[in-house]
Amino acid sequence: MLEKTTRMNYLYDFYHSLLTPKQRSYMSLYYLDDFSLGEIAEEYEVSRQAVYDNIKRTEAMLEEYEAKLLLFEKFQQRQDILKKLSDLLKTQPFATEQGNHLISELEKLD
């Protein structure tokens, strides 16, 4: 569950501007503020089922956006490359050829 929550938080960060205000609010309350479905339903005076359906549809939309735009995947790739580059430069400060190659890989992602 924690892995799904973390993924949804990242996807929300990348794609929240593509959501409606209600979708943003429900997702923010549910994933960022840890509200229950019942608490959100009470806040908006709708049924718990309506909140659940909205969140599930929004999750599917975020996954579709990611499948098409790959912003989160590229972010993860950049993080991996930066980690490798950092580790390389700590252990081999004069490894400029490998360092330049990793920097080049980073530039290709953008």
Image (tube, helix red, strand yellow):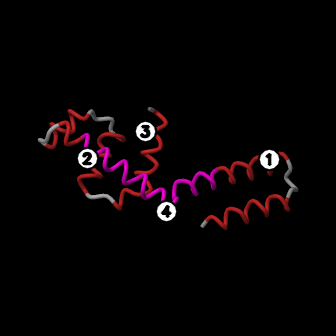
For disc 4, the marked residue is 69
For disc 2, the marked residue is 54
Q: Crowding near pointer 2: few (<14 within 10 Å), some, many (20+)?
A: some
- Tell me which numbered mark, 4 or 3, is placed earlier along the sequence: 3
Residue 19: percent from left, percent from top: 31, 58
Residue 40: percent from left, percent from top: 21, 39
For disc 1, the marked residue is 90
Q: Residue at x 67, y 67 (%)?
A: 107
Q: Nearer the viewer, residue 91 or 105?
A: 105
Q: Is 54 a magenta residue? A: yes
Q: Nearer the viewer, residue 1 or 80?
A: 1
How far apart are labels 1 and 3 at the CA level? 33 Å
Q: Residue at x 51, y 59 (%)?
A: 71
- Tell me which numbered mark, 1 or 4, is placed earlier along the sequence: 4
Q: Crowding near pointer 3: few (<14 within 10 Å), some, many (20+)?
A: few
Q: Is residue 4 above or below residue 93?
A: above
